[in-house]
Amino acid sequence: MTSDDQITIALSIGDPAGIGPEVVLKALTDPEIVSLAHWIVVGEHAVLRQAGETCGIPLCELSHVVLLEPAALPGSAPVRFGELNADYGRAAALYVQEATQLCMTGKADAMVTAPLNKEAVTSSGMSFLGHTEYIAQLCGAMEVRMLLASEKLKVIHVTTHVSLRQSTESTAERILRTIELGNEGLGLLGIERPRIAVAGLNPHAGEHGLFGTEDATNIAPAVREAQARGLDCIGPIAPDTVFLKAYRGGYDLVVAMYHDQGHIPMKLIAFEETVNVSLGLPIIRTSVDHGTAFDIAGKNQADARNMKAALRMAVSMARRKRLHGSKSAGRRLAR
């Protein structure tokens, strides 16, 4: 944790050839964002300067930002925007590693990640499934989940980057743990006792076994156990209706069984505002919920709204975590 009252956020710039450097620059030159925290940007000065030239933002406008340069890129050649490149993938992973280390050592209160490209990272020789899994490995976290959060809908996933077939094999224990992590995560978002709805896996949540047994054998027992532990939880609910009910205010959180079940409604209703949050880590990590957009990289067409939302959420969660820790310490001292 940082020494003064203001939050410090570490921000990795993502794949150098993508839109990450551009949205980082655009977000951190917004006066509203600038005032929220201390900012540490992890990435090469040359990459940011080149991105700034494409969008008309000279680096002198980031005088309030600390730049941490890992020297991850070989040589000094200009970045080729829009190119899938193993060197760029390796650099993006190193930026994430450095930002994670800042949080693990208490030099930053939270981290925010700009998008990287999985294919570029894996082509560099790394075993890489995604940001969430990589950060979990760096932190030594065994159970992590992906939460997508917007103002009107929040979804946590039981599984993400696995095959659809594998997602049907989720155990009651995994589903229960997902419910618990979602409950804890929404506490950091300011919802102390969230109303949680668990989506079914099969059409009509199985229709009493007519369309599969997973809902009755795996999901329902997890929901009953969550209720027994005092959580406000209901399900399984037919997946074709549960998201609409939550969007209209009936629930604070939906537990989705697999990646696309949760991502499709989120991206349909709030693509620019949805923030990706990693739960189950010892640190706070948020991210944009879009990719590297190689097709528009280097063309000053990237929209920074999603990055701004991720930055705001990281600051808000870090503040609540710090406040919660202070209250806990106060209770211990009073005993």
Image (cartoon, rainbow, N blue to C red):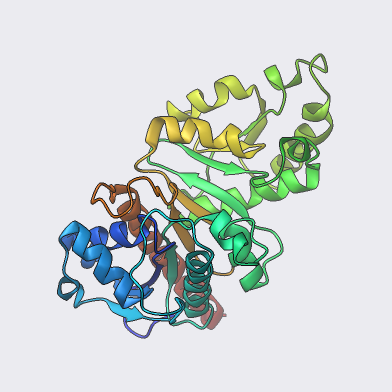
Rendering quarter of residue 153: top left
Q: In this view, does 174 lie above or below 203?
A: below
Residue 13 percent across, percent down from the top left: 39, 65
Q: In which quarter of the image is residue 119?
A: bottom right
- Choose between 227 and 180: the one closer to the eye: 180
198 to the left or right of 89: right
As drawn, 150 above or below 74: above
In x, y percent, where is residue 123?
A: 61, 61
Q: Which residue is painted at 16% across and 69% down in the image?
A: 58
- From the top left corner, tell me how far across and down residue 228 is, in percent: 74, 43
Regarding residue 231, the answer to whether it shows in the image is: yes
Q: Please tell me which residue lies in front, 323 or 200.
A: 200
Instruction: Give the residue at x 32% y 79%.
Output: 67
Tell me which residue sits at (65%, 38%) in the image: 258
- Name the spot of residue 261 as percent of width and height, x first: 60, 32
Q: In this view, which residue lies farthest toward the bottom?
A: 3
Quadrant of the snapshot with the N terminus: bottom left
